[in-house]
Amino acid sequence: MSRSAPPRSIRLRRSVLSVPAINRRALEKTHALDCDAVIFDLEDSVAPEKKAEARENLKAFWSGPPLEGRERIIRINAPSSEFGNADLDLVLALEPDAVLLPKVGEPQDVTDVMDRLSDADAAEELRIWAMIETPRGILNAAAIAEAGRTPGSRLDCFVVGLNDLRKDTGVLPEPGRTYLVPWLMQVIMAVRAYGLDAIDSVYNDFKDMAGLNAECGQGRAMGFDGKMLIHPGQIETANRHFGPDEHALAEAQAIIAAFADPAAANLNVVNMDGRMVERLHLVQAEGLVHKARLIAERQI
Ligand code: COA
Ligand code: MG
C-alpha cells in the first residue's frame, strides 16, 4: 500500500492577511489589497466584550460586494469557549472558504468541528484550517494532520502561531528563530506527510521590512507555502518570497522541456547541462509553473 502523501491541489497562499473583525475600516480595505487570502479574526484581536459586535461586522461585510479572488477564512474562538457556538453559527451562515480553529492541540479538536459541520449540512467546500500554536499542538502535529486523511475530511491547512507558542514555552523572540526552527520543521514534516499546506507565523514588527524580508526568506527555505500577515505593508514582501521567482521559473520550464523531448520518453533521469534531473523534479517543476500561471491569471 502506498504510504506517500495524497497529491495536494495547488493553491495560492503566499500572503494570508489577518484582519480583526472588530475593525470595520480595515475590513473594507481588504477589497483593494493584493493578498491571496484574508483571515477575518474573531479570536485574539477582538476583546471579549466586543465579540458580538465583531460578528455583526462580518455579517455586514458579507452582505456587501464579494471579496473576489481571495480565500476567505474566519478565525473563530475555541469551540468550547463561551463564544464558540455563536462563532460556528456565523460560519455556517456566511459560508467562507474555511474556518480557522485556534490553539488546536489534539486531533479531536478538528474532528469535533468536522462532525459539527457535517451535522449542520455545511457545504462540502467549507474547509478547516488549524492554528498550531501550543506545545501540545506541536507535539501532536502529525496526529492532527492525520485527522485530515479521513474520507470527507475538511482539514486543509496549518497556520503556525509563534506569539502563543513563545508565551507558552518561554522561548524569547530573536532574529533567526534559532530555538523555534525544530518545531517549525516538525510542522512542515506533518503537513507534507498528510498533504496539507502550512503557513508561517506573523512577523509582529510591521515597520521592520528588513526583518520581515529575512523571515519570509527563511520561511520559504523551510518549505512553508506562505506567511500569515498583520499589516497591508507586509503583503508585497510575502508575495515575492513565496511566489516562484524568475530564475526558479526558467529552471522549471527547462526541466519540463527536457522531459518533453521524445528521447526522454522512457527515461527517469536526464542530463541537464551536467546536472542530473529526475522525473520527480518534473512534478515539482509542473507545480511551480502552475503556481506562476495562477498568479498571472489572478484578477484583483
Ligand atoms: N488589514 C487591513 N487593513 C489594515 C490592517 C489589516 N490587518 N492593518 C492596518 N490596516 C490599515 C489601517 O486601517 C490603516 O488604514 P487608513 O490609513 O485608511 O486608516 C492603514 O492600513 C495603515 O495602518 P497603520 O496606521 O500603519 O496601522 P494601525 O495602527 O491602523 O494598525 C495594527 C496596526 C497592528 C493594530 C493593525 O495592523 C492590526 O490590527 N493588524 C492585525 C492584527 C491581528 O489580526 N492580530 C491577530 C493575528 S496575530
Ligand atoms: Mg494565537
Image: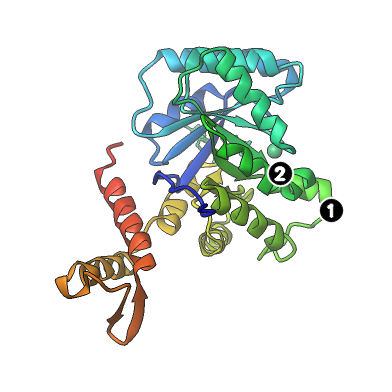
Q: Residue at x 31, y 48 (%)?
A: 295
Where is residue 164 drawn, in percent x and y? 74, 43
Task: Say which residue label 2 marks.
Answer: 133
Describe the element under mark 1 as helix, strand or loop: loop
Q: Which residue is drawn at 65% across and 39% down?
A: 131
Where is residue 87 drawn, in percent x and y? 63, 17
| Residue sitting at the far left | 262
Q: Distance between the residues labelled 1 and 2?
A: 13 Å
Q: Which residue is drawn at 27% across and 50% down?
A: 293
Q: 26 above or below 274?
A: above
Tell which of 260 and 273 is nearer to you: 260
Q: What residue type is labelled 2?
A: Glu
Q: Which residue is drawn at 73% across and 46% down?
A: 140
**Callout 2: few (<14), some (14-19), or many (20+) C-alpha neighbours within 10 Å?**
many
Q: Is residue 121 visible?
A: yes
Q: Which amino acid does label 1 sit on?
A: Gly
Q: Point out which mark residue 170 bears.
A: 1
Q: Is mark 2 within 8 Å of ligand 2?
A: yes
